[in-house]
Image (tube, rainbow, N blue to C red):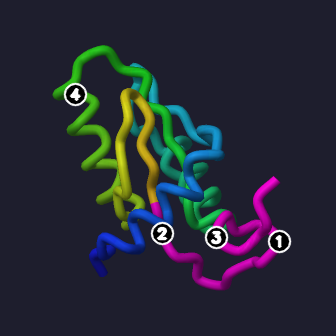
């Protein structure tokens, strides 16, 4: 389910005010990182993930692998941070970054 340009733009607007909730570092995509990312995606649907690796190509590969393992979609990358979207199985209106009011 590829996102269209309008959805991506709307998600980028929402994502601007978010802080990274998951960090992928030198150890890569461990089981714990993937599990935490899936929990965060199920709760919030739209999250930022920080990739704290030095090499650009390694970072690019990690982002692709992250999206494949979590079955999520990449919305945008800026520097070391990726904005990731995955619709929740059952949306929680209080936790979802897509429905709760911005502060």
For residue 102, above or below residue 17 = below
Q: Quadrant of residue 51?
A: top left
Q: Would you say the residues marked 2 and 3 are in contact, meaning their CB atoms lie under 8 Å apart? A: no
- Would you name the residue on which mark 1 appears? 94
Q: Which mark is residue 58?
A: 4
Residue 82 placement (x, y as % from top left): 42, 43
Q: Secondary structure at mark 4?
A: helix
Which residue is depicted at the point 37% across and 28% down? Answer: 79
Distance from disc 1 to disc 4, alpha carbons, whole Å, reads: 35 Å
Q: Quadrant of residue 41?
A: bottom right
Which numbered disc, 3 or 4, marks the residue closer to the eye?
Answer: 3
Residue 69 placement (x, y as % from top left): 35, 57
Residues drawn in magenta:
85-103
Q: Which mark is residue 86?
A: 2
Q: Residues within 10 Å of mark 4 (few under 14, many from 20)?
A: few
Q: Secondary structure at mark 2?
A: loop
In the rendered structure, the answer to whether residue 24 lies left or right of residue 89 reads: left
Which numbered disc, 1 or 4, marks the residue closer to the eye?
Answer: 1
Distance from disc 2 to disc 3, alpha carbons, whole Å, reads: 11 Å
């Amino acid at each position: 389910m590829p996102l269209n340009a309008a959805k991506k733009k709307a998600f980028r607007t929402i994502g601007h005010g978010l802080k990274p909730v998951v960090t992928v570092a030198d150890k890569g995509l461990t089981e714990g990182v993937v599990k935490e990312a899936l929990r965060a995606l199920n709760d919030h649907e739209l999250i930022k993930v920080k990739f704290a690796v030095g090499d650009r190509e390694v970072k690019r590969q990690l982002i692709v692998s992250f999206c494949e393992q979590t079955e999520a979609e990449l919305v945008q990358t800026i520097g070391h941070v990726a904005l990731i979207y995955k619709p929740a199985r059952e949306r929680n209106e209080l936790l979802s970054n897509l429905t709760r009011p911005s502060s």
